[in-house]
Amino acid sequence: MGLSRLAALHGVATSYSPSPDVTVSVPDDTVIAVLAALGVDAGTPADVRKCLVAAESRSRLLPPTVVVWAGEPLPPALSGLPPGSTVTVEPEPPETPGRPSGRPPAPLSMRARAAAPAPPVPPPGAPAPPVPPPGVAAVPVVPPGASAAPVQPPGDAVGASAPLAMPPGGAATASAPAVPPPAGAATASTPSVTPPAGAATAFAPVSPPPGTSTAFAPASAPHPQRADGEPGAPATLPAWWIPPAPGVHRVHVRTPDHRRATATLVVAPARVPQPPDRSHGFLVQLYSLLSARSWGMGDLGDLADLAAWSGRTLGSGFVQVNPLHAAVQGSPTDPSPYRPSSRRFPDPVHLHVESIPEYGHVRDRAALDDLRQDAAALSEAVLNKGVLIDRDAVWELKRQALELVVGVPLTPGRRAAYCDFLAEQGQALEDHALWCALAEVHGPDWHAWPEALRDPRSPGTARARTELLDRVDFHCRLAWLTASQLAAAQRAAEDAGMSVGIVHDLAVGVHPAGADTWAQQEAFAHGMSVGAPPDAFNARGQDWGLPPWRPDVLAATGYAAYRGLLRGLLAHAGALRIDHVMGLFRLWWVPEGRPPTDGTYVAQDAEAMLAVLVLEAHRAGTVVVGEDLGTVEPGVREALARRGVLGTSVLWFERDWDGDGRPLAPEKWRRDCLATATTHDLPSTAARLTGDHVTLRHRLGLLTRSLEEELTEDAAGTAEWLALLARLRMLPEGDGDEEAAVRAVHRFLLRTPARMTGVWLPDTVCDRRPQNLPGTWDQYPNWRLPIADAEGHPVTLEEITASPRLHALMDVLRPRKPHTAPPGERRP
């Protein structure tokens, strides 16, 4: 019992429910190991009692993080402070990329006086209410017996399906819980001291500093046409509250009895920006998209070209790519883009070398020509000789070329831009570049480095930083060049008329030996790996080999690592896809050396994680898409939808699971999603229609039943979908026409209300091979296949764009423009 209470205090589950009628207990050894990774010693009953006493006797005036949503009630942690408390908000300093911070904003000070709700907060964009003159307190009167506590706006039932798991001591938020806790139950948002019954708790503001705005003013977005037009309902707020600007601030509280508390204050808009209109676009794994000029794998030049062509020719609104995070160095490199060294910085292997301005000024042209010929040979082998994409070989050639390019002096303007980038990225970039430099000398696993170098802040590491200064600058330069080409790809998309642009992908975690785990060691839970529990599709569960962030450290540091990660990704994105978005709420932790079945869930501070995400997406003006496939905790999809995060809907999985289980009619699909026929982890549409994916899994020994049983079940499911398409008159060609069936599937997607429709680029040329086959390692060439046609012959970007099959499919989705007669021929 004591261990369960202690685990609950730290957000560690002692049981879980893989289905509504099944509850599985977590082994005590797992709970103890996970608590140890969180810095809690529960090895013996005496240790448990000691930690329980310490945790339960700790009185917190404020939780570590307080979240305030625009247009919604203040959280109880603020609205329930004792009368007479002084609240001071220390705003975060303004940030100007490449420039030192200016004078910090003046703090906002408030003091408790009397009790009464203030008038409703106007939605963003409405005129600000009049502010009392300096020194005049706004003190409304509360009728006897009236409650001064804020209430949820009536009719606001979004996300009310179930309460969400959240670690005690986590973020206090402005949102009321979807389901009230039992009477007397302690909640994370309850302050340690509450006003006595009938006490007045409204507040009067101390004079705000000159120039302080008391209206919530959303930060301007680079894409005003995508500004959020759906503000939350006006909320009743106490008169004391001087709304800070959106940001991550510090809040200081002092009570009349001289208790003090400080917490992180996240002030966020109610929702992330939304797509301006319905759109369609391609989904592609960039490495698989080779052009005639590629160096053996697709690059950022190819991405910009695809975006420009599809936006102008097909009216596409976006291109979604795989994670472009920096990979772990070494040979062989892990080819999976979902297990990177760093999620914060991009991988220079994606550079299009010839597009770098200094490339044309390299003096040793013969060396560059030789490297270019070797690169052409790599591409020839992939495209015409059946050779797999070899990322290591590509990087070796590009590294040599980049050494020559970086040797060219920068022009004054380019040097100034590079210095701005260094100043903007700061310590994080320096650490990443130093890891890259040290990995060149000591190998890619920092755990095996000399002991003095395993700590990024040790004297030995400081000496190495000086000794390897040239190599550190080299890797910093590569990060800048890659960021520049990412920006160029987004500009190309926008110039082509795309409403969204490039959709970047955020992986769940990072490689345990990579740059992020070295530079941010205190933020990761050592000895733990993220995965998935056993389910109907995988009885053994999954271990992804990705160390998780510690929720307590994130909160204690104001989510600095998370914010830096999001800012880096959003800087050059039209939208961000978050892989396994359920990880914002909880993650399945597996102790090292144990099977995934012996893991457990650890709760994240979901409101804080969401608030930071919404804030950073709002600042960047980007759409957010969450990959929410598979088993999803009740209430998660509703919480994401409330904040404007789009979901992901894959046709074959969209059935009436609460009814007869048949395919879901198009009008019943959710609107706020990216709808698609497949993803990188699933069979292509052609393979799904023909059953080829079942045969492939049988050939690799992955089936748990006979081939005949699997094929029969798969064919029955496909037949149900084809019958629905026929009933809806989307398959006029009839049965037996595979190309027509692929078009019908996409006609169906277009019939749904989904905001975004994704077309898997390999589907346009009838590629039958999946890019990744879950459950395999060396049995299948995951992440190494070029896009190919129906016969399995690789095709280039140029061949794809000229494909009659692609154009026939995209005619289904292409926006229809009304015909306009030339001037002089228009009839009156």
Image (cartoon, grey):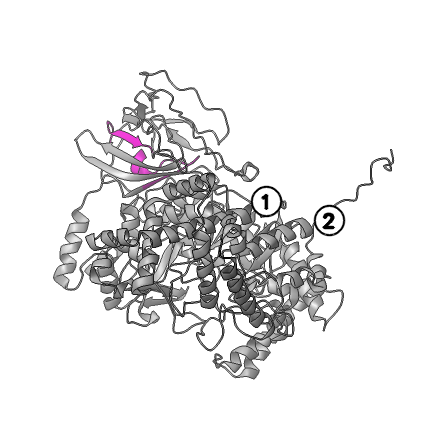
| Residue on which the image places disc 2 | 816
Compute the Cα span from label 2 to label 1.
20 Å
Task: Identify which residue, 177 or 196, lies in the foreground.
Answer: 177
Location of residue 4 by image quarter: bottom left
Task: Identify which residue, 547 or 382, lies in the foreground.
Answer: 382
Q: In the structure shown, which secondary structural element does the residue marked by tag 2 occupy?
A: loop
Q: Position of residue 621 (x, y in %)?
A: 50, 41
Magenta run includes residue 632: no
Which range of residues does the magenta coloring cover?
A: 66-91
Kind of residue indicated by mark 2: Arg
Instruction: Please name the residue shown 43% across and 33% down the image.
Output: 235
Contact between marks 2 and 1 (CB within 8 A): the answer is no
Q: Is residue 283 left or right of residue 90?
A: right
- Is the residue 433 above or below the residue 81 in the image? below
Task: Identify which residue, 652 or 508, lies in the foreground.
Answer: 508
Q: Is residue 236 left or right of residue 263?
A: right
Kind of residue indicated by mark 1: Glu
Instruction: Please name the residue shown 18% across and 46% down the image.
Output: 58
Task: Identify which residue, 271 or 521, lies in the foreground.
Answer: 521
